[in-house]
Image (tube, rainbow, N blue to C red):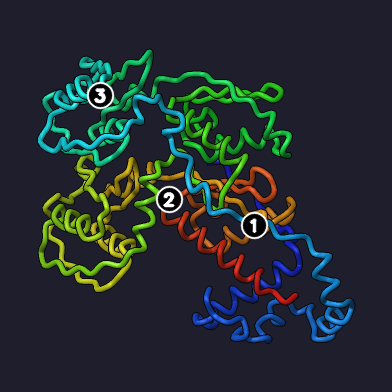
């Protein structure tokens, strides 16, 4: 995996001194957290973190000019929007596939699902049986799924747990294997003119794509995907799923939010919000599959066990679970539950899946972060990247982790990481913002 070398670079003096003091205060005194009063931070800790700063220096700075004049000269801090929170793949789907439907397929076969798509939705579906035979998939196999006011393509995506893939060509849905879909590469040109006018660099955009969108799929990582840049165009050869992510990246770069996920359905964002909801549980030797069903009901969250991914483990769907927690966030409950079993959880296709830990990287997501309020030039961007890698040790490739972090331009950051890493990163950025807002420097 390509490593991005981060050399120490100076952030704005007020950024470094205040944020370092704040983080030291939180370390020394956990009470000095995001919602705590800054008055609780020991002055000595700040002076110790920045020994060059003396009381005389502070006095000279305070007396140098009138506070009102100083504030009027400061550039206005950009307002960071909470939206868009995601670029939904439905924006790049045919209209027939994004129609919403409600239908229960829990007692249906794949053949019955195909019949419903044809008769009820007016779609043409062609199963590639000879290719499905390679993975021993039969049309008589159960679907065990449902749609609850969801787009039709969602249930097609979720067939991936049965190693079934699909693609749409000439108004026909082809059902085949995931492996065959991954081999269907097409070339699409992308115009970069507007992004170049907005001070993005074409070479950097190419690097961002290769590093943060399915990194293992590109030829520089022994994959089949390719990118070529010609003037203000780039030509991308890869799967349709990755093309949707590239289109989403272009949109997100032009107008990023606080945290904008690429190719992520709105339903996934709703699931992510519910992770903070508290739940009380008390299980005594409950089967794992029943525990997940109960958690789904208690939290109104679509939680399922990815049976195909755990077959290689010693975990069974009826593995007995004993766990008692009171009024705890769902995310904590899931972390403890799957951690004890050596499993992991990911949000994918409108479902929170409990899956094999080794499959966890497949659940990595790409998000664009608007951090214009934290860094305004390349030096400050590099400094912020260095701070993030330092404060989240072992997670990013710069520190021997799996996650990737790149700047598309100063103030616009792109990250490929797990759900938990994205959540931790957003929390860290908000702490930085809190520290800067309260800075008296």
- Tell me if residue 373 can be seen: yes
Disc assigned to residue 121: 3
Residue at image point 74% right, 69% down: 14
Query: Mark 1 highlights which residue?
Result: 79
Q: Please state if 124 lies on the left or on the right of 92 as rendered.
A: left
The percent coordinates of residue 304 (x first, y second) are 23, 48
For this orientation, the residue located farthest to the top is: 170
Alpha-carbon neighbours of circle 1 within 10 Å: few (<14), some, or many (≥20)?
few
- The spot of residue 138 in percent (x, y) is 15, 24
Residue drawn at x 71%, y 58% is: 8
Spatial distance from mark 3 to mark 1, Cα to Cα?
Answer: 44 Å
Residue 135 disc label: none
Asked which secondary structure carries label 2, the reply is: loop
Closer to the observer: label 1 or label 2? 1
Q: Which residue is mark 2?
A: 418
* Dot in front, 3 or 2: 3
* Residue 263, percent from left and from top: 45, 38
- Vertical side of 244 occupied by 45: above or below: below
Residue at the spot 24% in from the left edge and 73% down from the top edge: 326
Residue 65 appears in which quarter of the rendering? bottom right
Quarter of the figure with the C terminus: bottom right
Classify mark 2: residues with Cα within 10 Å, few (<14), some (14-19) or many (20+).
Answer: many
Residue 127 left/right relative to 5: left
Which badge, 3 or 1, comes first in the chain's sequence?
1
Q: Are marks 3 and 2 in contact (CB under 8 Å)?
A: no
SS under mark 3: loop
Residue at figure coordinates x 14%, y 25% from the top left: 112
Alpha carbon separation for disc pair 1 and 2: 27 Å
Residue 322 in picture, x, y percent from top left = 15, 66
Among the 4 quarters of the image, the one containing residue 277: bottom left
Seen from the viewer's position, the closer of residues 314 and 383 is 383
77 or 176, nearer to the observer:
77
């Amino acid at each position: 995996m390509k490593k991005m070398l981060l050399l120490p670079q100076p952030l704005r003096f007020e950024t470094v001194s205040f944020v370092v003091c704040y983080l030291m205060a939180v370390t020394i005194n956990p009470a000095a957290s995001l919602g705590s009063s800054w008055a609780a931070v020991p002055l000595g800790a700040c002076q110790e973190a920045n020994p060059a700063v003396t009381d005389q220096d502070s006095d000279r700075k305070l007396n140098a000019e009138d506070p009102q004049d100083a504030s009027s000269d400061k550039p206005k801090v950009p307002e960071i929007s909470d939206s868009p929170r995601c670029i939904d793949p439905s924006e790049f789907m045919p209209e027939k596939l994004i129609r919403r439907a409600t239908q229960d397929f829990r007692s249906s076969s794949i053949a019955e699902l195909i019949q419903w798509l044809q008769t009820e939705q007016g779609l043409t579906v062609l199963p590639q049986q000879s290719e499905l035979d390679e993975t021993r998939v039969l049309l008589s196999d159960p679907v065990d799924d449902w749609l609850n006011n969801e787009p039709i393509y969602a249930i097609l995506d979720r067939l991936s747990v049965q190693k079934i893939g699909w693609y749409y060509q000439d108004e026909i849905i082809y059902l085949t294997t995931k492996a065959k879909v991954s081999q269907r590469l097409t070339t699409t040109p992308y115009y970069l003119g507007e992004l170049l006018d907005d001070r993005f660099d074409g070479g950097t955009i190419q690097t961002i794509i290769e590093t943060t969108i399915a990194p293992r799929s590109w030829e520089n990582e022994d994959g089949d995907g390719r990118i070529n840049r010609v003037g203000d165009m780039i030509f991308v050869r890869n799967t349709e799923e990755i093309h949707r992510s590239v289109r989403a990246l272009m949109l997100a770069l032009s107008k990023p939010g606080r945290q904008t996920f690429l190719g992520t359905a709105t339903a996934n964002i709703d699931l992510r919000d519910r992770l903070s909801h508290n739940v009380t549980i008390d299980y005594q030797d409950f089967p794992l599959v029943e525990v997940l069903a109960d958690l789904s009901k208690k939290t109104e969250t679509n939680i399922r066990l990815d049976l195909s991914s755990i077959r290689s483990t010693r975990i069974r769907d009826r593995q007995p679970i004993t766990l008692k927690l009171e009024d705890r966030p769902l995310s904590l409950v899931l972390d403890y539950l799957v951690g004890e079993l050596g499993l992991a959880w990911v949000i994918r296709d409108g479902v929170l899946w409990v899956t094999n830990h080794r499959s966890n990287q497949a659940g990595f997501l790409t998000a664009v972060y608007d951090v214009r309020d934290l860094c305004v030039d390349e030096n400050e961007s590099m400094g912020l990247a260095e701070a993030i890698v330092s404060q989240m040790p072992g997670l990013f490739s710069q520190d021997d982790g799996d996650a990737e972090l790149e700047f598309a331009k100063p103030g616009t950051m792109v990250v490929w990481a797990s759900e938990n890493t994205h959540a931790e990163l957003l929390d860290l950025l908000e702490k930085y913002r809190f520290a800067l807002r309260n800075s008296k420097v």
